[in-house]
Image (tube, grey):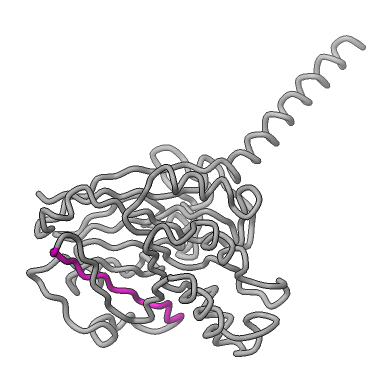
């Protein structure tokens, strides 16, 4: 009887150690998802152009000052980095909120052009109370810090990316928190003869993005559905149960949307079969 109890205790302990280790790895073992995206009107000069997407960091750190995250990015050597929001947390209880991202950007040493759009956590802090964003300053002060580090913050704006004389259009929708997306009123019309890339935190408006004329969309927000099951996908997100856009590539007519599973967690630190993700997209013309 004593031997049997001891055996049960050992097995239980081994299972617990396995589960704790698995849980820890799921939260902290960064994955890199590589995809090649073919765009019909992409200039040949942009063949092989590499884009790294970061999203939903939520003040998470992978090593001291995100050293492991920086190392992964440097190994990819992207042409640009796009950031699609929720890089901090919507809470005035966090001292120096946003400094985790600032340190990450400083450690990237201005090696890559970086483009940023906000999510609800950045915008929510601003709209709830202008002075609640950080202990000192406001959303504008935070974005000024980003700009001083060479980051282009796109608040319902367009910029142009050039390579060997060719160009593509990059648009950014800041998170608007409520109401209809109103994309054309905010960004104007697209040039249908050029490549139009859109950064927008929420993937739920994919139909609107595609109808507007986005060839390629980068989005996040869903955290991969938190728990990812084979043949089912992610279980939970801000969209609700079984989100349609949990992570990966989605297609609608001539538009492609890339949805990042994100890096951090909020409010629950939970990832099952759903490791933190860096997205690497390589562009190719058809």
Which part of the image, by quadrant, shows the N terminus?
Answer: top right
Instruction: Determine the image quadrant of residue 98.
Output: bottom right
Q: Is residue 137 left or right of residue 51?
A: right
Residue that lies at the very extreme toward the bottom in this rendered image: 130
Which residue is nearer to you in this view: 277 or 106?
A: 106
Give percent across and percent down for residue 132.
66, 85
Q: Please tell me which residue is depicted at 56% across the width and 45% down the height of the picture.
A: 68
Q: Please tell me which residue is depicted at 47% across the width and 48% down the height of the picture.
A: 277
Give percent across and percent down for residue 210.
21, 67
Give percent across and percent down for residue 27.
60, 46
Which residue is nearer to you in this view: 149 or 158?
A: 149
Q: Please tell me which residue is depicted at 28% across the width and 68% down the height of the picture.
A: 198
Q: Establish if 29 lies above or below 92.
A: above
Instruction: Determine the image quadrant of residue 128.
Output: bottom right
Give percent across and percent down for residue 96.
68, 72
What main secondary structure does the magenta stretch of the protein show?
A: strand
Q: Is residue 21 left or right of residue 102?
A: right
Report if residue 176 lies within the magenta region: yes
Residue that lies at the very extreme toward the left in this rendered image: 193
- In the rendered picture of this protein, how many numbered marks are placed on residues? 0
Report if residue 19 lies within the magenta region: no
Q: Please tell me which residue is depicted at 35% across the width and 51% down the height of the picture.
A: 78
Residue that lies at the very extreme toward the right in this rendered image: 2
Q: Establish if 167 lies above or below 180.
A: above
Which residue is nearer to you in this view: 163 or 10?
A: 163
Q: Identify the magenta region.
A: 165-177
Q: Establish if 73 lies above or below 205.
A: above
């Amino acid at each position: 009887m004593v031997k049997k109890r001891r055996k049960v205790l050992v097995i239980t302990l081994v299972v617990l150690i396995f589960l704790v280790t698995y849980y820890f790895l799921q939260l902290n073992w960064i994955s890199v998802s590589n995809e090649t995206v073919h765009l019909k009107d992409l200039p040949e000069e942009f063949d092989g152009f590499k884009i790294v997407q970061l999203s939903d960091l939520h003040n998470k750190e992978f090593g001291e000052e995100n050293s492991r995250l920086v190392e992964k990015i440097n190994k990819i050597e992207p042409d640009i980095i796009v950031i699609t929001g929720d890089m901090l947390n919507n809470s005035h209880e966090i001292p120096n909120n946003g400094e985790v991202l600032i340190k990450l950007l400083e450690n990237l040493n201005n090696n890559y052009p970086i483009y940023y759009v906000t999510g609800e956590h950045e915008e929510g802090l601003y709209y709830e109370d202008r002075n609640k964003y950080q202990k000192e300053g406001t959303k504008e002060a935070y974005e000024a810090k980003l700009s001083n580090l060479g980051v282009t913050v796109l608040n319902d704006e367009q910029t142009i990316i050039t390579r060997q004389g060719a160009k593509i259009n990059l648009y950014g929708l800041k998170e608007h928190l409520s109401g209809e997306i109103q994309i054309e009123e905010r960004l104007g019309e697209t040039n249908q003869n050029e490549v139009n890339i859109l950064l927008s935190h929420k993937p739920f408006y994919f139909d609107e993005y595609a109808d507007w004329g986005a060839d390629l969309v980068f989005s996040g927000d869903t955290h991969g559905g938190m728990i990812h099951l084979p043949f089912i996908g992610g279980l939970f997100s801000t969209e609700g149960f079984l989100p349609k856009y949990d992570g990966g590539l989605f297609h609608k007519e001539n538009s492609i949307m890339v949805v990042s599973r994100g890096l951090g967690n909020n409010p629950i630190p939970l990832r099952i079969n759903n490791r933190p993700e860096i997205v690497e997209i390589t562009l190719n013309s058809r």
